[in-house]
Amino acid sequence: MSVPTTAERFAALHRPGRPLLLPNAWDHASAVALARAGFAAVGTTSLGVAAAAGLPDAACATREQTLALARSLTGLDVPVTVDIEGGFGGTPAQVTELVAELAGAGVAGVNLEDGRGTGLAAVAAQAELIGEIKTRVPGVFLNARTDAFWLGVPEARAEALARVRAYAGAGADGVFVPGAADGGDVEPLVCAAGVPLNVLVQPGVPVERLAAMGVARISFGSLLFRAALHAAVTTALEVSRGLPPACGIPSYEAVQALHRHG
């Protein structure tokens, strides 16, 4: 019996009704800490990677930072999936080569979005790109994201449905629709896609409810990065006012040990 590849292990974690809870890291330490906390896989957050480098998100600015982070994480015991925005502004050939490079380094999956600033990429062009990537790198788990809800385009639900059908038909292994949360959005998407549906964690929407709708993956997106910023500033202000630091903060030795992973 052959041993499953990392990408195959990652794909098997996408189970409608028993969704993969995917935390998103922004650097080496956060990814290792999340893996050690017991999460079955770790993703990256493009906002976190960009903000940590002093750069804007979704502006084709963090290709090198994303590659460097991905290379540093592929020794983890858990599968890693990488957010490559829309491909960082590359040509279809360049985006395909980027995915091939990530897969060659041991990355299990990528997120590829169709948002382009304030609008969406042409659906035919995006589907063609997905097809090219899957032809060149068939083993990578390609999660095709549509920003129809995220950008508030007219008739967002109909647009999202059309796009998940097109992307799944082009070979995407999963589809990601941030902004979809209630049953009126999610259940039609599950039926239309025919591949695992990924949504974002939504305050006030329990994981169990999303699972019951047939969601196969729930991502934290930039939530953890933003929570870390909030905790850092809150701790600094509280200590400056003479209050003790919150309980549970990792020790120096615990953080120092995060460089050892595997």
Image: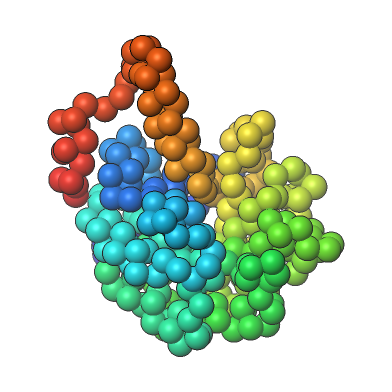
Task: Evaluate whether residue 56 shows in this view.
Answer: yes
23 sits to left or right of 131: left
* Quarter of the N terminus within the rendering: bottom left
Foreground of the two, 12 or 60: 60
Tell me which residue sits at (76%, 58%) in the image.
Answer: 152
Residue 13 vertical placement versus 153 (above, below)? above
164 sits to left or right of 103: right
90 sits to left or right of 250: right
Tell me which residue sits at (33%, 46%) in the image.
Answer: 31
Residue 77 lies, in percent from the top left, at 25, 50
**Hey, which residue is sitting farthest right in the picture?**
155
Residue 151 lies, in percent from the top left, at 71, 60
Foreground of the two, 244 or 219: 244
Tell me which residue sits at (55%, 46%) in the image.
Answer: 218
Tell me which residue sits at (68%, 50%) in the image.
Answer: 179
Task: Evaluate whether residue 144 shows in this view.
Answer: no
Residue 193 lies, in percent from the top left, at 67, 63
Foreground of the two, 17 or 183: 183
Residue 223 lies, in percent from the top left, at 51, 41
Residue 95 vertical placement versus 230 (above, below)? below
Q: Quadrant of residue 136?
A: bottom left
Residue 110 vertical placement versus 166 (above, below)? above
Foreground of the two, 88 or 217: 88
Tell how many labels. Answer: 0
Q: How is the image coloured?
A: rainbow
